[in-house]
Structure formats: structure tokens, C-alpha cells
Image (cartoon, rainbow, N blue to C red):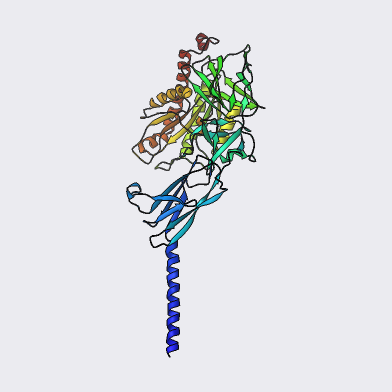
Amino acid sequence: MLRAACMHFSRGCGLLAGLILSYKATYAQTLIQRAETVPAADQWLQPGDRLQVRVQAQAGCQATFFGGKPLVELAPALTKGQRGIYQGTYVVQPGDTLHDRPITVEVLAPDSTRSTASTRNKVRFLNPNEPQLALTKGALAYLNYGIGEDRLGGAKLGYLDSLVVLHLTGRVGNLYRVQLSGSQMAWVPQEVIRLLPPGGFVPRSLTGSWSVYGDSLYDYVQVPLDARLPYRSQLLTEPTRLAVDVFGATSNTNWITQRDGLQALSDVHYEQPEPDVFRLVLDLRHKQAWGYSIAYQGNTLVIKVKRPPAKLRLRGLTIAVDAGHGGTNVGATGATGAREKDITLAIAQRLRQELTRHGARVVMTRETEKTVENSDRILRLRQLNPNLLVSIHVNSTGNATTQGTSTYYRYLAFRPLSVALYEAMRRTGLKGFGNVGSFNFGLNGPTEYPNALVETAFISNAEDEKRLIDPRFQQQIAEQLTKGIEEFLRRTRRRGIGGWLSAKAQEQ
């Protein structure tokens, strides 16, 4: 009997020990609720960059990451009262190695219980001695200023031609950091580049001597380089000029040949604001810029500057009209069930009739109820080469009392068109919601022609919606937009367009 009692006691002790071990294991697992990198995305970092980690765990513990680097528990005042939030930063040092691995964190509780966890995202440390290069691909590759995004995407620095060589120095998710010069960087989306094997030379070039000339349609500037380098352009006003920065280029330009036939360009020269930034400065003859494009022919950078229309009046102009949304892209919907895609198409068709009646040639980005991606619209407009573009949309907001009309532009040089359209829309009796600049919408991105977007009215407002679905009001919008374009042309004439084309000739 005594032996049996001892055996029962022994089994009980073993069971208790097992329960204690199981409890400790479960307790250790619950020490850490979450571990993540900040930003919470796969990252590439180089020496000097910051590896940032945040952990949510039991309060009052000691926490470390990346082989013993301390994590600091934040005061509740910094976390909206939440306890157990730990953060840490490590500055990547030369010689550090890490190849697409998650970051491990460890938490030590006051009772000496330890728990480890790994971040979901992975981190790579880049070796500066093995540069990572990439080539742009596709017809609409572009750079962003930073990694922030909203419903319009990231803020775009500008478009790039294909096969442009980029030096990548970091990554956050699907965005790669591009080192443009010693002091400037940008970000490029993964879908518009092709990674090259590491170890290539960072692209650099001396510039050759320029050729500046014109043909029957455009003025051109050609600058020979050793590689397709990234660039950024700005169309400035007062005075009207085009500035193009070529990154990685240093001047070896010893002359600039300006041939006969120039009509859009005036003086051209260059600056070297940084040792590896070469700036082309192209003064324009006309106060109103009519567009430009930048591309490569081989390794020669070619800037094509558009001339003003022969006569600044509707008759003979090619005007693009964009009916926003369409097909599966319904857009905003009103309380009555009215859909943005239907209203924009109805207004666009009426606008086409009005413009055609005044002698303009109208091209449409969509003419029927179908889905057309914005990228396809932009590429088609490149081929159609309009004199200007008007994109028609319907606004919406969660506040049903908000109402009124507004126009949008991205580039300051194209603001006069958006202002003229805004003033015309106000003459319909709609309240004013404003004229908005630096608008990061796809159809406002092209530099090849002046463009503006019109948010006709708020479909989310009962009064505005009632007007928008009225065919008579749609016709009134079309008539006023036509008058707005005419006013833009008149103001351009009054501002003066340069010596080669007199204002008197414009009135004929």
C-alpha cells in the first residue's frame, strides 16, 4: 500500500511538473503579441540607413532585437495609454551583412521567462561595393518623390523613357529608392523597372555639344550622353522656360549650335548646380507653353518643344475630351442612383458637339460605355497629339452639404486653362469649390499639351446631383466649357505669343 501511494504521488508530481512547463511555454508565447519593422514592409537598407523595429509585448520587460540591440518601452503618454510598446533603432554600419532575413526580437520577463519572435517582413543590407542597378521598362515609367501614397498614388516627380539606368540604394515594399545625385533621391515602383545583376558601374556621363534645330512641327534640343541617365523637368513661368536636370551628368559641352527654323525656343544655355547634375535651361518665345516631351534616341537625350497653334481660335484646333471613368469603373454614385461614368460621358458628348460646331477637331478618350484604363488614355493621347485636353469628372464627398464646381491642374504653366474653365463653370450658377494645383491625377501628368480636369459638381449633394442629371444643365455645362476654352485662347492672344506670330494674324 505504501508503494502504491508513493507511485500515485510520483505520478501526481510528474503531472504537476508537466502542467507547470506547459504553462510556462504558453506564458512565454504570450509575452510577445506582435513584432514588426517600421515601415512594415520588406526593406533594403545601406550603411547610414535606420533599421526600425516595434514590438507589442507584456509591459515591464527587457526587450532586444538584432543580436542584443535594446528596445525601449515607450511611456503611455506616447502610445495613447497603451503599455508594452517597445521601439528600437539601429543605424546600419559598413560591413553589416543581412540577406533577406526577418528581424528576431527577444523579450525577457521579470520572472526570467524568455520569448522570441520574428518580423513578418524581411530585410537586406546592401553592399555599396556591389551597386544594384535597374532599367526602366514600359512607356510610362515614372519616379516618385517619396513613399507616401493616397488614392491618387504617390506624388510623382515625373515620367522617364524606357531603358534609363537607375542606381538603387534602398527598398520599402514595392518601391525602390533611386540615388539621382550626391544629394538627391527619388523612388521608383517595382512594376516599371527590371533589376540588373549587382556589380555594375553607377552610371555617369560627360555631356557632348548640343544641336538645337526645328522642323515643320517642333523645336528640338539634342544632347549626346554615354548612357541613358534619369532626368527631371520643370516648366516655369515669368519668364516661360523649360528646365531639365540630367542626373549623373557633368558638362563637357563646349558649344551649342542653334540652327535656322526655331520658332518655340529662344535662348538656350546650361548650368551645373551640382557636380553630378547638369541643367538645361531653354527659354521659350511664348508666354503660354504648349507642351514638350523628353526621350532618348540611343544615348542622345532629345527634348521636343511644341509650338503654339497656327491660330489661337477654336476653328482648326485639335481638342481632346476625356469622359472620366467608364465600364467597370463606375466612379461616384448619387442618392438617386445616378452614376459618374454616365454623367461624364453625356457631358463629354455634348461638349464634342459644341466644339465641333465651332470648327474644332475633337478626339475622345472614350465614346461608349466601356472600361478604358487611364494609362491607355495617356498613351492614346500621345499618338493623337491634341492641342489641349479637358477631362470631365463628377465630385463626391462624405459630407452631403458640400457642393460646387472646381478645376484642377498639375503644372503651373497650364493653370491659365484651368482658371478659364473654372470661371466658365461658375457662370452655370454652381457654387465655387476652388481651383486646385499640383494635382497628382494621371490625366494631368502629361507634359505634351496643356490640360485641365473639371469636377463639374458634387453628386453627393442633392442639389448638385439634381442639376447633373438634367440634360438641359449638361448642355449648359458643355456650352460654358466651350466658352472657357475660347476665353483661354483670347487671354493667350492678349498676353502675347512672341515675334514670329503677330496678334493681328491671330484675329484673322
* Occupied quadrant, residue 277: top right
Residue at x-position 49% and y-position 34%: 145
Foreground: 183 or 480?
183
x and y percentages locating residue 446 in the rendered image: 54, 29
The percent position of residue 165, horizontal first and vertical second, equals: 61, 33
Q: Note whether 129 is above or below 293 in the view shown.
A: below
| Quarter of the image with the N terminus in it | bottom left
Position above or below: 349 against 74:
above
Q: Position of residue 218 (x, y in %)?
A: 60, 18
**Residue 396 visible in the current orientation:** yes
Residue at the far right in the pictured view: 298
Whether residue 371 is visible, yes or no, is no
Q: In the picture, residue 150 is in which quadrant?
A: top left
Up the image or down, 164 lies above or below 44; here it is above
Of 101 and 281, which appears nearest the observer? 101
Total marks in image:
0
Q: Quadrant of residue 134?
A: top right
Q: Position of residue 439 (x, y in %)?
A: 46, 31
Is 238 on the left or on the right of 307, as rendered? left
